[in-house]
């Protein structure tokens, strides 16, 4: 299915945010995901189902100065 990740069209086979995070090899910590404008807690990623044309925003924490 086609979804929008950080304003970029992306093809994915992932059914939920948990699978998407694994597909994208996201870190276990320091990552936040919003689905269609709503932040989703990490413990809810498995139940946050993806649909065609969904908008996903991924925010990664960066250390440094």
Image (cartoon, rainbow, N blue to C red):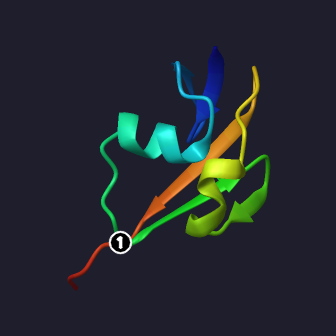
User: Which residue sits at x=49%, y=38%?
Assistant: 20
Other residues around mark 1 within 10 Å, as few (<14) / some (14–19) / many (≥20): few
- Counting labels gives 1
User: Of all residues shown, which one is farthest toward the bottom?
Assistant: 65
Q: Quadrant of residue 61?
A: bottom left
Query: Is residue 39 positioned above or below 5 on the image?
Result: below
Query: Is residue 39 positioned above or below 50 on the image?
Result: below
Q: Is residue 40 left or right of residue 43?
A: right
User: Which residue sits at x=70%, y=50%?
Assistant: 47
Residue 45 in the image, given as x and y percentages of width and height? 61, 55
Say which element carries label 1: loop
Q: Quadrant of residue 25?
A: top left
Q: Is residue 38 left or right of residue 63?
A: right
Query: Is residue 5 positioned above or below 21 on the image?
Result: above
User: Which residue sits at x=30%, y=73%?
Assistant: 62
Placement of the N terminus among the 4 image quadrants: top right
Residue matched to label 1: 29
Residue 48 in the image, given as x and y percentages of width and height? 71, 48
Q: Is residue 11 left or right of residue 25?
A: right
Placement of the C terminus among the 4 image quadrants: bottom left
Q: Is residue 65 left or right of residue 58?
A: left
Q: Nearer the viewer, residue 8 or 41?
A: 41
Query: Is residue 62 positioned above or below 26 on the image?
Result: below
Residue 50 in the image, given as x and y percentages of width and height? 70, 33
């Amino acid at each position: 299915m086609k979804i929008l990740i950080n304003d970029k069209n992306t093809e994915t086979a992932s059914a939920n945010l948990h699978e998407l995070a694994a597909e994208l090899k996201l870190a276990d910590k320091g990552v936040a995901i919003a689905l269609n404008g709503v932040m989703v807690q990490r413990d809810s990623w498995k139940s946050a189902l993806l649909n065609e044309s969904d908008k996903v925003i991924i925010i990664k924490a960066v250390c440094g100065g």
